[in-house]
Amino acid sequence: MNILVGIRPESDFKNSQDFISDGLLDSFDLVVLVSELESAYGILIDALDILPENFCNAEAIAKVIVKNGGKIE
């Protein structure tokens, strides 16, 4: 959540079920988010996993992190 707020501090991610549909993240934000996640978790997110549905909410993002070798604490 901290990474998302860092990218878009004005957005209310906690009350959104779909960050993409609700307009909280756009395609440029996804590129930034992927880069930030890779740095924060020491992983490389597979290009095939960079799809809007994998970044639509916190649960989906956590699954992508774990799938690509990251650990969620």
Image (cartoon, grey):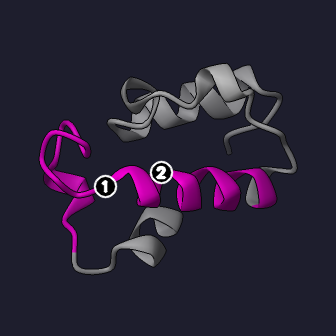
Residue farthest along the front direction in this orientation: 28
In the image, the segment drawn in magenta is 11-39
Q: Residue at x 39, y 50 (%)?
A: 27
Which quadrant is the C terminus positioned in? top right
Helix, strand or loop at disc 2? Answer: helix
Q: Which residue is mark 2?
A: 30
Under mark 1, the amino acid is: Leu
**Which quarter of the figure has residue 33?**
bottom right
Which residue reaches farthest right? Answer: 42
Q: Position of residue 23 (x, y in %)?
A: 16, 53
Q: Quadrant of residue 39?
A: bottom right
Q: Amino acid at mark 2?
A: Leu
**Quadrant for the N terminus in the image:** bottom left
**Mark 1 falls on what kind of element?**
loop
Count residues near mark 2 (Cα–Cα under 10 Å), then give few for <14, some for 14-19, many for 20+: some
Looking at the image, residue 44 lies above or below residue 31 = above
